[in-house]
């Protein structure tokens, strides 16, 4: 009986993740993020920043996008947007949580939010600066591309889902990227995302002659041995939860 109880407690502890909602004040504005501390400790901790879509919350993203289960040795940070974005396709009045849509927009309020969180985790954690990653969905994906353009030197790799942005990256540092989009997306049209994916391939000098396709996913490399992964799904605007294990494998393969 005692042994069974110990086994149960051990199993439960392995499945339980420590999460904390933290508040940051950026130029007088309160910002929030949910932190999932690493379950498996290491000398230096990789970090994954996750940005929800327009109208979302950090809580929603943490419930749906379980990167902490697939990457238990990483510090996973679910960032939360705020209202005020008026050039969104779905919220012209800016009533719902979102992220700035362009570089230098809204006084770079969301870039400053990232800067503050990134600064604080360097003070409070022993993080691996060669393994910093960003994941975004929809409006969050677009913002990930802004971070790539404006803070790209801090990151090892990016994941963008259901959001274009490849045209911004001409002056950005080359990094590995996973691009995922749906052929039936009713919010960000397929043609726009398909065009954007071609811009990524062009910007990163992908070797298209030696691409490898597995189902809906095509893998490319470039002369610097960076990865460009394009996941073209028979789906809509949603985040492909079933792809998270492969996405985490992609992140683990890439260092700054």
Image (tube, helix red, strand yellow):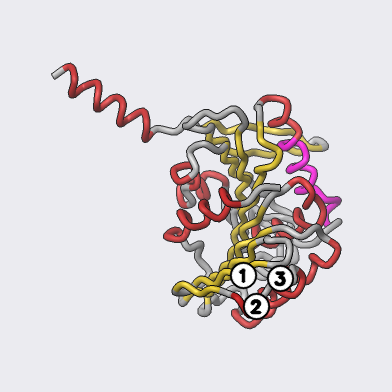
Q: Can residue 156 be found in the magenta stretch?
A: no
Give the residue number, with chain letter if any, for mark 1: 220
Split into 4 quadrants, where in the image is the N terminus?
top left
Q: Is residue 86 left or right of residue 212?
A: right
- Front residue of 165/110: it is 165
Marks 1 and 2, the one that precedes in the sequence: 2
Left or right of 6? Residue 151 is: right
- What x and y, as percent, mark residue 244? 48, 55
Give the SS element for disc 1. Answer: strand
Q: Main secondary structure of the magenta part?
A: helix
Distance between the Cα atoms at labels 3 and 1? 11 Å
Picture residue at 67% right of the left edge, 79% below the top: 192
Q: Which residues are magenta?
A: 105-118
Q: Which mark is residue 200?
A: 3
Which is more N-terminal, label 3 or label 2? Answer: 3
Indicate the quadrant where residue 122 lies: top right
The quarter of the displayed image where residue 43 is located: top right
The reply to whether discs 1 and 2 touch (Cβ–Cβ < 8 Å) is: yes
> Which residue is more in the foreground, 61 or 56?
61
Question: Residue 177: horizontal and vertical position, in percent?
Answer: 65, 61
Q: CA distance from mark 1 to mark 2?
A: 7 Å
Residue 19 placement, left or right of 88: left
Inter-mark Cα distance, 2 to 3: 12 Å
């Amino acid at each position: 009986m005692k042994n069974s109880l110990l086994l149960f407690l051990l199993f439960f502890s392995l499945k339980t993740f420590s999460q904390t909602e933290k508040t940051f004040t950026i130029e007088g504005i309160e910002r929030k993020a949910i932190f999932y501390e690493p379950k498996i400790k290491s000398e230096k901790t990789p970090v994954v920043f996750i940005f929800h879509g327009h109208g979302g919350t950090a809580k929603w993203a943490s419930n749906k996008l379980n990167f902490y289960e697939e990457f238990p040795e990483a510090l996973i940070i679910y960032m939360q947007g705020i209202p005020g974005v008026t050039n969104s396709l779905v919220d012209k009045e800016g009533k719902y949580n979102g992220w700035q849509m362009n570089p230098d927009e809204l006084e770079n309020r969301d870039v400053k939010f990232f800067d503050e969180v990134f600064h604080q985790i360097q003070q409070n954690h022993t993080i691996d600066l060669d393994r910093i990653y960003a994941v975004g969905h929809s409006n969050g994906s677009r913002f990930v591309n802004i971070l790539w353009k404006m803070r790209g030197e801090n990151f090892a790799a990016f994941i963008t889902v259901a959001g274009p942005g490849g045209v911004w990256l001409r002056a950005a540092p080359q990094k590995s990227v996973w691009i995922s989009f749906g052929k039936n997306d009713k919010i960000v049209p397929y043609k726009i995302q398909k065009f954007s994916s071609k811009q990524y391939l062009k910007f990163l000098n992908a070797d298209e002659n030696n691409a490898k396709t597995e189902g809906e996913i095509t893998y490319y490399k470039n002369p610097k041995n960076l990865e460009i992964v394009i996941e073209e799904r028979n789906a809509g605007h949603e985040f492909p939860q079933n792809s998270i294990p492969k996405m985490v494998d992609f992140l683990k393969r890439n260092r700054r």
